[in-house]
Amino acid sequence: MDAVAETTSFFDSAPLLKDAETITTKLTQFIDHNKSSLSGIVGPRRVVCVTSGGTTVPLEQRCVRYIDNFSSGHRGATSTEYFLQSGYSVIFLYRRGTCQPFCRSLPDDALLECFELTDDSCIKVQESQSEVVKRAIKEHHKAVSGGLLLKLPFTTIFEYLQILRLIATSMKIVGASGMFYLAAAVSDFYVPWETMVVHKIQSASGPLDMRLAQVPKMLSVLRNEWAPQAFCVSFKLETDKEILLEKADTALKRYKMHAVVANELSTRKEVQKKISRYKTCEELKRANLSVN
């Protein structure tokens, strides 16, 4: 079965995406706004889809348990800020609960650590956090109200891939002005919806044996079918550095990525490799990195 057929089979068996019509409307309005926005440059504004955070794989249809993918979303959120600063409009496809653009300088528990009660029971920003909070609110409001940032959340692998398809097909109209920056940690395996139990798996039934199916490789479909003119950057994370560059090379050749950012888990915050389809490999170390 080829990639297109595998992808079609995956979507046909996936649970229906909630709010698909609303998401499509938001995408159409966002892209129409930016397609006609000159903003001091010749032609349409460049539009990038940044994916961020990890996907979950439900083990039950009424999900209690799931398999998760490791990702805090810091890289995607930070990259979104830099894309906005560089004149791009950004569709930010993010995992619910992960790091958000303009919030990386805030404490982990921002609501409780940035605010305090006054003597008359009003809420105010703590003095020590006031500049950080003001900057985050100002930059976020500027991007969203200006039609430059559209945020779309996901949790499961089913939601992520269905929304990504909607984004890609919507962005087809911007052609070479479109870009995909795929920093999300996407599950390689999943439980097909039709084979998934409905209710919570019971421990009284004894040890659990479960067969996972492979998630279809969507990168080639994205490049060849959904948005063939867009510039595409994918990310590769491995724990074994011996196979990291091999996997990155596969993404360039088989899936026709324009560039791959390769990270080893243990050194992902200090070192990353940027590999292009023109066989260049640039190693970036922490002093030169702009993301966490």
Image (spheres, helix red, strand yellow):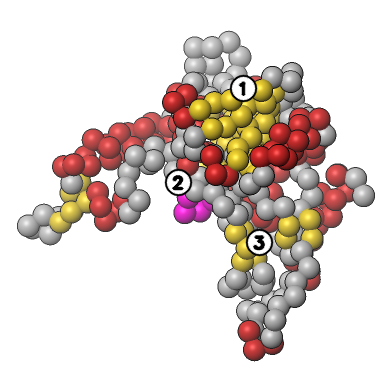
Q: Are marks 1 and 2 in contact (CB under 8 Å)?
A: no
Between marks 1 and 2, how big is the CA–CA gap?
27 Å
Which residue lies most toward the bottom here? 204
- Indicate which disc, 1 or 2, sits on the residue closer to the N terminus: 2
Task: Give the magenta part as a residue range.
Answer: 95-99
Which residue lies most toward the right here? 1
At label 3, counting other C-alpha atoms closer than 10 Å, the crowd grade (few under 14, some 14-19, many 20 or more) is many
User: The residue tagged with tag 1: helix, strand or loop?
Assistant: strand
User: The residue tagged with tag 3: helix, strand or loop?
Assistant: strand
Three-letter residue code for mark 3 = Val
| Front in this rendered view, residue 254 or 248 | 248
Q: At which x and y percent is residue 255?
A: 79, 34
Three-letter residue code for mark 1 = Glu
- Is 139 a magenta residue? no
At label 1, counting other C-alpha atoms closer than 10 Å, the crowd grade (few under 14, some 14-19, many 20 or more) is few
Which residue lies most toward the left here? 119
Question: Relative to residue 126, is residue 182 depicted above or below?
Answer: above
Q: At which x and y percent is residue 58?
A: 65, 65
Question: Relative to residue 2, is residue 258 depicted above or below?
Answer: above
Which residue lies most toward the front here? 242
- Is 98 a magenta residue? yes
Q: At which x and y percent is residue 230?
A: 70, 27
Q: At which x and y percent is residue 254?
A: 82, 34
Question: Relative to residue 1, is residue 61 depicted above or below?
Answer: below
Three-letter residue code for mark 2 = Cys
Between marks 2 and 3, how big is the CA–CA gap?
20 Å
Q: Which residue is mark 2?
A: 99
Q: Which residue is mark 1?
A: 282
Q: Which residue is mark 3?
A: 57
